[in-house]
Image (cartoon, grey):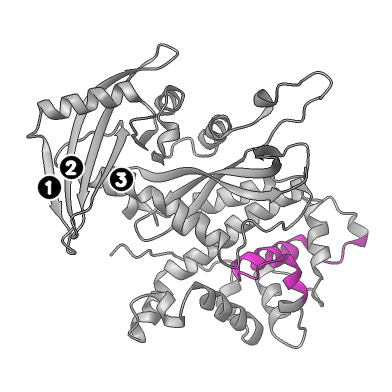
C-alpha cells in the first residue's frame, strides 16, 4: 500500500493500520468509531494478534482517527482495488471456485445498489432524484461479483456511479450530466478485461442489460451472458420468441422438485436481433414456467449466447439465471443489514468513502471464506449442526465469536509463518 505520510512522524506501520481497518468489517463492528471501544484493550490479546497478522511490533493500539488519517495518504482508491484484485486472483488460480463453473465459465453477477443517500448535496459527484418537492442526493455503485450456489458473493470489480463535475455556467443539461448503470458498465468492463484478461466468465444480469451495447461488448471480450428477458425491454424479439414457441411445442423439458414444485423449460435458439446501431446479434432464449404445489404459476425468461439443449437448459436456468439473486441476497442485503453497514457513511469525504467501501468488500470476502470454508464446517459436523451459522446462532454470532477469539486467545505460531499454505475448500453439496 502506498503511504505518503511524513515518515519521521509515523508511529503506526501501514500494514498494522490496514489490518485494523479490515477488522472493522471482518468483525462486523458497524462503524469505524467502534475501533475505540472493541479494539482498544491493551490488557487483552488484541495487540499481540494484530502484530502477528501485520508482522509488526507495535507497542500500542491506535484510535480510529489514526486509521482515517492513514486512508488520506494511500493515493486514492486504486491500491484497495488492486488488493481486492490480488485476493480474487489467488482464489481463482488455486482453483477453489472451479466446482461452480457453468460450462467452464465462472458466473459473475452484475447489479447496482444504493450506497449513500443525503437530503443535501454531499459533493459535486452526487446523483440527484426528485420525489415531489424533495430532491434526494445519492451515490449508487455497480458491482461485479462471482456467485455460487453455496451462497458465495465475491466482489471482483466495482464502478462508482457518479456525475462528472460540470461548470453550471456552461452546462444546463441535467439529464446529460447524470451518470447511470449502463455508462458505469462501459467503464467497469474496460477495467475488468484489463484485470482478468483470460478469465472465462458468464455475466448474469437483469433486463436492463438486454441491449445491443451489452451484447456487443460481451462478444468483443468473448464473455458469455445470461440476462433476464422481459416483454417490455425487447417487445419485438419477445413476440418472435412466443410465436416460435407455439410452432415447436415438443422442444421442452420437465422437472419436478422434492417439494412438488413443477418446472417446464422451453427454448428457442438462434433468434436474430438487430440493435439501434444496426448490429445483428444471434441470441438463444429460455423460458421457465414454474408451478408451485398450490398451483400458482410464475414465468421466468432469459436471453443467452450459451447453447441450449436438453443437457444444458437446467444448468443455464439455475446457475446463470436464477442464481443472479445471490448478489442481492447474500451480497447487498447481507452487506446492508448486518454489521457491515454498507449504507453507513464511514466518511463524508467521497474519496475515503470509496476506500472504506472497498475495505468492506475485502472484509466480507474474508468472512465468507471463514464461514464457507472446510474448517468450521468440520466443527459444525462435530457438534451435529447442519451449518456453521447454526453452530452459533447466525452470522452475527460468528463475527462476535471471532472478535472474542482475537481478544482472549493468542493466534498460534503457524498462523503467521510465511511458508504456511492455507487452502479454501468450498462446500459443493
Q: Quadrant of residue 287?
A: top left
Q: Identify the mark at residue 102; answer none if there is no mark.
A: 3
Q: Quadrant of residue 26?
A: bottom right
Say above or below: 129 vs 281.
Answer: below
x 69%, y 69%: residue = 55
Image coords of residue 321 (percent x, y): 33, 44
Q: CA distance from mark 3 to mark 2?
A: 18 Å
Dot 2 lies on which element? strand
Residue toward you, 113 or 149:
113
Label 1 with label 2: CB-CB less than 8 Å: yes
State left or right for residue 314 relative to residue 156. Answer: left
Residue named by callout 2: 265
Q: Quadrant of residue 427?
A: bottom left
Dot 1 lies on which element? strand
Image coords of residue 351 (percent x, y): 75, 46
Can you see residue 282? no
Indicate which disc, 1 or 3, sits on the residue closer to the N terminus: 3
Residue lying at the far right in this picture: please name it: 8
Q: Identify the mark at residue 254; answer none if there is no mark.
A: 1
State left or right for residue 428 relative to residue 266. Answer: right
Pair 3/2: label in front: 2
Q: Which residues are magenta?
A: 9-36
- Which image quadrant: the C terminus? bottom left
Dot 3 lies on which element? loop
Q: CA distance from mark 1 to mark 3?
A: 21 Å
Label 2 neighbour load within 10 Å: few <14, some 14-19, many 20+: many
Amino acid at each position: 500500500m502506498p503511504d505518503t505520510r511524513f515518515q519521521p512522524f509515523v508511529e503506526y506501520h501501514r500494514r498494522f493500520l490496514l489490518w485494523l481497518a479490515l477488522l472493522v468489517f471482518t468483525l462486523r463492528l458497524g462503524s469505524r468509531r467502534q475501533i475505540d471501544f472493541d479494539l482498544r484493550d491493551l490488557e487483552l490479546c488484541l495487540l499481540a494478534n494484530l502484530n502477528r497478522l501485520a508482522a509488526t511490533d507495535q507497542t500500542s493500539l491506535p484510535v480510529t482517527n489514526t486509521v482515517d488519517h492513514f486512508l488520506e495518504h494511500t493515493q486514492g482508491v486504486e491500491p484497495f482495488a488492486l488488493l481486492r484484485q490480488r485476493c480474487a486472483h489467488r482464489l481463482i488460480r488455486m482453483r477453489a471456485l472451479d466446482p461452480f463453473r457453468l460450462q467452464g465459465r465462472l458466473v459473475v453477477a452484475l447489479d447496482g445498489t444504493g450506497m449513500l443517500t443525503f437530503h443535501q448535496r454531499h459533493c459535486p459527484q452526487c446523483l440527484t432524484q426528485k420525489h415531489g418537492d424533495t430532491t434526494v442526493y445519492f451515490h449508487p455503485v455497480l458491482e461485479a461479483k462471482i456467485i455460487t450456489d453455496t451462497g458465495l458473493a465475491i466482489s471482483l470489480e466495482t464502478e462508482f456511479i457518479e456525475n462528472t463535475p460540470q461548470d453550471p455556467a456552461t452546462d444546463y443539461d441535467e439529464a446529460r450530466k447524470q451518470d447511470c448503470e449502463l455508462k458505469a458498465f462501459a467503464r467497469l468492463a474496460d477495467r475488468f478485461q484489463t484485470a482478468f484478461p483470460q478469465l472465462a466468465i458468464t455475466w448474469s444480469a437483469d433486463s436492463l442489460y438486454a441491449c445491443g451495447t451489452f451484447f456487443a461488448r460481451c462478444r468483443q471480450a468473448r464473455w458469455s451472458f445470461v440476462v433476464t428477458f422481459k416483454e417490455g425491454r425487447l417487445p419485438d424479439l419477445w413476440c418472435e420468441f412466443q410465436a416460435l414457441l407455439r410452432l415447436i411445442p415438443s422442444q421442452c423439458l420437465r422437472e419436478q422438485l422434492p417439494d412438488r414444485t413443477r418446472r417446464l423449460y422451453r427454448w428457442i435458439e438462434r433468434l436474430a436481433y438487430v440493435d439501434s446501431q444496426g448490429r445483428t446479434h444471434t441470441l438463444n432464449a429460455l423460458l421457465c414456467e414454474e408451478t408451485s404445489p398450490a398451483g400458482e404459476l410464475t414465468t421466468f425468461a432469459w436471453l443467452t449466447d450459451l447453447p441450449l439443449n436438453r443437457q444444458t437448459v437446467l444448468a443455464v436456468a439455475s446457475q446463470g439465471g436464477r442464481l443472479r439473486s445471490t448478489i442481492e441476497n447474500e451480497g447487498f442485503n447481507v452487506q446492508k443489514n448486518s454489521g457491515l453497514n454498507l449504507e453507513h457513511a464511514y466518511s463524508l469525504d467521497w474519496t475515503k468513502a470509496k476506500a472504506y467501501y472497498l475495505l468492506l468488500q475485502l472484509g466480507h470476502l474474508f468472512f465468507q471464506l471463514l464461514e464457507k470454508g472446510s474448517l468450521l464446517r468440520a466443527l459444525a459436523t462435530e457438534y451435529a449442526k447442519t451449518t456453521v451459522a447454526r453452530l452459533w446462532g447466525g452470522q452475527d454470532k460468528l463475527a462476535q465469536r471471532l472478535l472474542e477469539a482475537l481478544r482472549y486467545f493468542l493466534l498460534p505460531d503457524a498462523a503467521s509463518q510465511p511458508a504456511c499454505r492455507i487452502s479454501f475448500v468450498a462446500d459443493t453439496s
